Image (tube, rainbow, N blue to C red):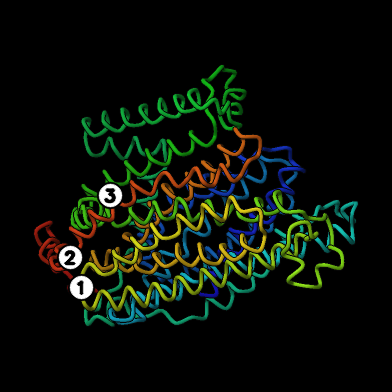
Amino acid sequence: MLVYVLNFIDRQILSILANDIKADLGVDDGYLGFLYGTAFAIFYALFGIPLGKLADSWKRVRLMTLGLALWSAMTAASGFARDATTLTVARIGVGVGEATASPSAYSLISDWFPARLRATALAIYSSGIYIGGGVSLLIGGAIVDQWNSAFPDGGALGLAGWQVAFIAVGLPGLLLAVWVLTLKEPIRGAIDGLEAPENPKPFQGFVTELFTVIPGFTFFGAAQRGMAALAVNIAVFFVAMIAAVGLTHVLGSGAGAIVLGVGASLGADLPAVTDQWLLLALGYYAVFCWASALRVRDYPTFALTWGSPAFLCTILGYGTVAFMAYSASYWGAPYAERVFTLTIGVSGGCARDPIDMMMIGCELSKGELGFWLGGGGALGGFLGVILGGRMADYLFIRTSGGRIWVILFGLVTPVPFAVVQYTTPSFALFSILNVVVGALAASALGAAAASSQALVLPRMRGTATATFFLATTLVGLALGPYTAGYVSALNKGDLSAGVLSTLWITPLGLVLLIGALRLVPAANASVIERARAAGEADPAATVGV
């Protein structure tokens, strides 16, 4: 859990720094949504695929150690960014590093805890999301306040408070990586009585997967499967690019730095494509390539993931929860900073009285804002994910579809509270509802993670985790925060309109999860049979794990 706490400190600290970055770099809310969401999410999701495969075949503790060191170093590097392009590149590096964490951790937890406690264990691990997210606001706000107060001119290095905050949270991760390396690697599958032998060539599958998801190399991978596969691959690539150009034109989001840079280097006038839609198109294309290759190379895994309607309804249904949750959690601090009266540095006397401080018109520093929102968000998220995980385990014992009811609860119940939260003129009520909305949305995570693990064999858990996170990232993280930022930018920085615009996805999530309720019980009961039918020689699994 400690690793995941740091994971989300490094990821979520951008929230409390967003308005400072906007002012210093001259960007808009659309870019801030892109930076937090898509720039991170695409690379996090795509590298999660080969790294998920590596987690299925190599030492998971070592893999997590390397990833922790990389994302911590790239977070620290964000502190030296002087322009949007450099900050974007650093953010991409954070995404690649963090892609190692959950495939490794989910697989380790599944080998450390028995099936009856797995949802709870995964929920405790996942609570790091909310603890880390809350702590990031506390730390980030305090650092910005103190640095800008002490060094208004940036100090000897000419760094703004937001840059120092990135450096301060990035460096400790390098020390934590040394400790993680000392953890004991469990025997894969032993806790289920289905011990899996070590893979003699653990990196072979990783390299193969890597080449199936990198655009460009994907053409060669498709060609190896025949000319028909290559033709389909090329067609999908062009459809994705046409869709990116079309979305840029329809939404009027303008040309992005990537296409402008490529065009300048080639001396060509390329069609205008916003970075958001270009990366998203490449991401969806790459996922298609990977799924197509997986179907040929490991059909049993494909059949129990991409070929399973129950699995797809579950992960996409949770993806709609993430769409709203990521948007609200990221934009909460920037929204409050703009709507409620704040000072640049340390606030006046009313800050000493918690009751007065939460009233309209009282001056709040960024550090105090981080305390109220970060502490409340951490509390709500932690309680929600733990209680949701326990409820998921309780219901699962009584009905095989019980975990899906918890996901459904996490989708529907936050909506009315979110509407009030982002329209109230009271900071006190906003802060209280920040706890409530966070807790309700968080309740779905442990149930969704455990449900996805239960629908595959032990050897497939790392790949299933990577596929699960495709839904949470490519549906939730890559689209939710950007949608809110884009709508806000269209409405002259109105983040209330932006965040509430993400609620439209609720009916779609409802349809998906109702489908999961109908499909998951039978799928849980037939994992071994479906694996055998797909060609698995010796299914190393138990029903309903």
SS class of the residue under badge 2? Answer: helix
User: Which residue lies at the image location 72% right of the left edge and 53% below the top edge?
Assistant: 340
Relative image position of residue 495 (x, y in whole percent) = 61, 44
Separation (CA) of disc 3 from disc 1: 20 Å
Q: Quadrant of the C terminus?
A: bottom left
Closer to the eye: label 1 or 2: 1
User: Which residue lies at the image location 62% right of the left edge and 63% below the top edge?
Assistant: 431
Where does label 2 land, which residue? 521
Q: Amino acid at mark 3?
A: Val
* Circle 1/circle 2 CB separation < 8 Å: yes
Separation (CA) of disc 2 from disc 3: 17 Å
149 horizontally vs 426: left or right: right
SS class of the residue under badge 1? Answer: loop
User: Which residue lies at the image location 81% right of the left edge and 72% below the top edge?
Assistant: 352
* Circle 2/circle 3 CB separation < 8 Å: no
Q: Amino acid at mark 1?
A: Thr
Where does label 1 land, which residue? 399
User: Which residue lies at the image location 35% right of the left edge and 61% below the top edge?
Assistant: 465
* Circle 3/circle 1 CB separation < 8 Å: no
- For residue 511, the mark is 3
25 horizontally vs 517: left or right: right
